[in-house]
Image (tube, coloured by chain):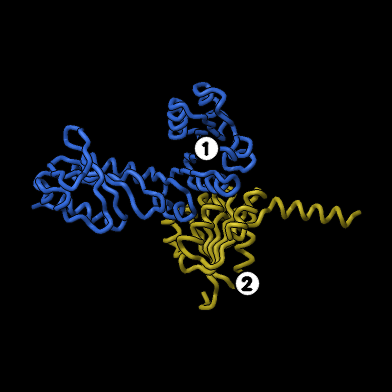
Amino acid sequence: MYAIVVGGGSIGYYLARGLLIRGNEVTLIERDPVRANARAEDLGSIVVTSDGTEPNVLRDSGAARADVVAATTGDDGANLVACQVAKHLFNVPRTMSVVWDPDHARLFDHLGVDVIISATDLLLANIEEKLSADSMTRFFRLHGGDRGVVGVHVPPGAEAVGRAVADLDTPMGAEMAAIVRGNGRVQQASAGARIEEGDEVIAVVPLEQEEALWQTLTRQR
Amino acid sequence: MTSDARRVIIVGCGRVGGMVAEALLEQGDDVTILDTNQEHFRRLREHARLHMVAADGTSVETLRSVNAGGAEVFIALAAADTTNALAAQTAHVLFRVPRVVCRINDPQRRDMYGRLGLRAVSSSRVVADLVLGVMGEEE
């Protein structure tokens, strides 16, 4: 796979490195020369010092044959433009973007960015999760944006404890996918699987049903 | 404020943003101008129909706070194309402002946004055309 990563900050750097280690071809585009040099010392000649939101720069980086363009800068505007240029001028099949203002996620989705990672939402979800054991983690949104993959911790004393997946009051359109047991073992959320306290239930859920799903799995007896 | 004044939001109080704001105020419009740098508002004189807000015009929360949904016109004239592309599309898609204009200096990106339905103007292109026009007249 050929991936172009726009933005050589922490996210872009680790993403590029991870993709390289997995055997992919990668170009990392970073505008700031000082930062680009620092990244090149580690990653070598795959680093390009330039503005990855400019059509000429993306063209010279081989955007026309790229399988994915991932925009990871600290600026939502730059990320959006990089994805739109990749998609509309070079027909890149998959565009990914980090968004910082969570309210922009809906805009990016509407404008056709394929994968949207809301950094702020992820951090918030993680912080909330660390602070309270019964909260919900939003992992990512599925293509189309109206459904997401979430994980819900089942707290002690929840109504759901001891019940089979098929017997849960699962909200419309939601699908239980997997159960991560307290000991870290993962199993499929088949109809007969029983929920135990301390489980994390992974589910695909329409955004408007997230609250209902959370209620189903955490409501106290 | 008169009741039939158009509500216009301008993002970016640089030279062009400032000039457009003054011209629209003169026409009787109600103008809200946003810029992250308060210093830039020095370009403008106080006016009863002018609201200067030191905030990020790409932020959904900021645009909500200045009631962007009730604006008739939205003009993005910040320094960076990327800021303008984000602000203009936020206004167009999330706030459904009927008339959105933005400056996209890079000609290739300008053409792309034109095809995507944004009214985008490129000052580079405008100036280049003017220069070529003047040269043509002198020949």
Query: Which one is in front, A202 or A33?
Result: A202
Amino acid type shown at disc 2: Gln
Residue at the spot x=50%, y=39% of the render?
A68
Tell me the tag on residue B27.
2
* Element type where label 2 sits in the image: loop
Of badges 1 and 2, the one in the foreground is 1
Residue to which mark 1 is pinned: A6
Judge left or right: residue A15 versus residue A130: right
Q: Give the residue drawn at x 50%, y 24%.
A: A43
Dot 1: within a 10 Å radius of its alpha carbon, few (fewer than 14), some, or many (20 or more) residues?
A: many
**x, y (%) of residue B38?**
52, 52
Residue sitting farthest toward the bottom? B3
Chain ID, blue in image: A
Rendering colour (chain B): yellow
SS category of the residue bearing label 1: strand
Q: Position of residue A221 (x, y in %)?
A: 8, 52
